[in-house]
Amino acid sequence: MLFSKNKNLKNFSSGNNITLIKGGREYFTVLENLIDEAKESIHLHSYIFTTDKIGAKIIDALKKSAKNGVAVFVLVDTVGSFDLSSEVAEDMRKSGIHFRFFSPLLSREGFHFGRRLHQKVIVIDSNKAMVGGINIADRYLGSKQKKAWFDFAVLAEGDIAREINDICASIWEKKFTKKHWHQENKIKRTHQLAKLSKSLIENSLVRVRENDWARRKSGISRSYKYVFKNAENYITIIGAYFLPSRALRKLIKKASGRGVKISVILSQESDEKVFKLAMNHLYGWFIRHNIKIYEYKPSVVHAKAAVSDDIWTTIGSHDLNFLSTYGLVEMNVEVLNKEFALNFKKELDEIIKKDCVRISVQSIGRKWITERIVEWFAYHVMRVSFWILTFLTVKEE
């Protein structure tokens, strides 16, 4: 069974309450409630933060918290939140919010484009944290006329929230030393490991995983590699920008070859047209190796999550592609719990059944040669672009 040995349970903690949060109105209702209930501190990180309807509403909630004496820290990415004006940023600062843009494109050190803040996190009073793939913009909320972009998040209450708070604080303060939280809980974790594997099915074991290649962090990537190497029954993935590297595709191929049933849910409609064409180029390879590809029809898929063998679930901001692995600051929450995994698998199975179409060999075979050439070209354009962006990644911030 996955993670059945103590040595594979490093950095997991027990005693946390974990709740699956769906994107759209459910997510933003929880987000507003979290901000409203804060008493001491808020850390909010987002790649995209707009000033449209939902963005303005969240800003007002943050201002209210700051006015009530809560220490509010908001960090958004310079590129992703390019539309957020300096006037709005200054207004937040005047309202008592500690606000800044992550990694400005131009600084005294030069021009910076790589290493973007891609994680989407909020931590309240160091005891509640929500981690997912959902940005703050109307398209993630949806409306009566248009369905919200499809995504998930995890609401965590307990020790794991304190760890996430320390990570957010270290990024805000530009300090990247070993977390004090880990030092405090080293003895506690050692004691837990002796009994974790015995209660794995009954209890929720949780850990936060980061990818930040410039800071030598690749926890999310290591987890995916471990699961592809050790899964016995199935792996179901839902991805926004699914373009796994050749090395990762080898692991996927081996997993499928030993009988693991692999399914991938992708978007029929995409906000990134070139990326969509690049993903289409790999459809034939996946189908040849018995990987089932499904396209979600109702709206854009923006989720980044996976579940395996009725025990392991990961949800967060990390996409399975080269850029997300090496060029972006990412965060996922991993959950080892049978009930949570079964419920999430059921959710994805329902999506496949009701809202998806399966990609077949026949549908690929009906493509014109010009379509295939365009998809091949898009795939290689994306590969080269990823390499360039990764090369531009810097350690400042």
Image (tube, helix red, strand yellow):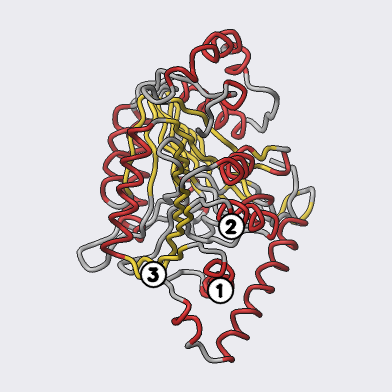
Q: Quadrant of residue 248?
A: bottom right
At a point 73% along the width and 56% down the height, the residue shown is 390
The spot of residue 262 in percent (x, y) is 48, 55
At a point 28% along the width and 55% down the height, the residue shown is 350
Above or below — where is 348 with respect to 120?
below
Amino acid beneath label 2: Val
Give the secondary structure at mark 2. Answer: loop
The spot of residue 205 in percent (x, y) is 45, 25
Residue highlighted by disc 1:
284
Q: Nearer the viewer, residue 396 or 329?
A: 329
Mark 1–mark 2 distance (CA, rounded to whole Å): 33 Å
Mark 2–mark 3 distance (CA, rounded to whole Å): 35 Å
State if disc 3 and disc 2 touch (CB < 8 Å): no
> Dot 2: few (<14), some (14–19), or many (≥20) neighbours within 10 Å?
some
Identify the mark at residue 383; answer none if there is no mark: none
At a point 62% along the width and 23% down the height, the residue shown is 7
How many labels, in total? 3
Residue highlighted by disc 2:
79
The spot of residue 102 in percent (x, y) is 60, 45
Q: Nearer the viewer, mark 1 or mark 2?
A: 1
Left or right placement of residue 314 versus residue 145 in this view: right
The spot of residue 206 in percent (x, y) is 47, 28
Q: Quadrant of residue 113?
A: bottom right
Q: Nearer the viewer, residue 277 or 130?
A: 277
Give the secondary structure at mark 1. Answer: helix
Q: Nearer the viewer, mark 2 or mark 3?
A: 3
Q: State which tag comes first along the sequence, 3 or 1.
A: 1
Residue highlighted by disc 3:
358
Give the secondary structure at mark 3. Answer: strand
Amino acid beneath label 3: Arg
